[in-house]
Amino acid sequence: MRDFKDSKIKIASGIIAIMMLLYIVFSTFFISLEANHKCADEENCPICVCMQICQNTLHQISDFTALAVFAFVPVIFLLGVSFVVSLNLIKETPVTNKIRLNN
C-alpha cells in the first residue's frame, strides 16, 4: 500500500517538473520570438503584458535556482568531507579483510 502512495507522489512530482521545464522553454521561446515587437498601443498591448509576465517568472525561477545552489553546495561539500574522513577512520581488522580464523 505504501509503495502505491510513493509511486503516485513520484509520478506527480515528475509531471510538475516536466510542466515547469516546458513553461521555461516556451517562455524563453516566446520572448525570443517577440523581441522585435512594435506595439501601437503602449498601454494595453497584450503581447507586452505577456512578455513581462514571462520575464518576471523566469527571473523568479533563476533567483530560486541561485538560492538552491548556494544552499546545497555546503551540504554536498560537508558530505564529501565526511566521506573522506570516514574512510580514514575505518580500521583494518581480520574480519574486515574477511580472513577466516581457524583454531
Image: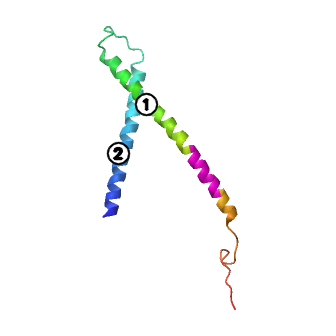
In the displayed structure, would residue 61 be above or below residue 5? above
Tell me if 6 is positioned left or right of 77 in this view. left
Q: Give the residue pinned by disc 1.
A: 60
Q: Nearer the viewer, residue 72 or 16?
A: 72
Mark 2 and mark 1 in contact? Answer it, CB < 8 Å. no
Q: Amino acid at mark 1?
A: Gln
Quarter of the image with the C terminus is bottom right
Please give the range of residues in magenta: 73-83
95 shown above or below 88: below
Q: Residue at x 42, y 18 (%)?
A: 35
Label 1's element? Answer: helix
Residue 34 spot, x, y in % from top left: 39, 19
Residue 92 in picture, x, y percent from top left: 70, 72
- Front label number (2 vs 1): 1
Rate crowding at label 2 as few (under 14), some (14 to 19) or many (20 or more) other CA atoms within 10 Å: few
Find residue 50 and report its image quarter.
top left
* Residue at which label 2 appears: 15
Among the two numbered marks 2 and 1 on one chain, the one whose residue lies closer to the N terminus? 2
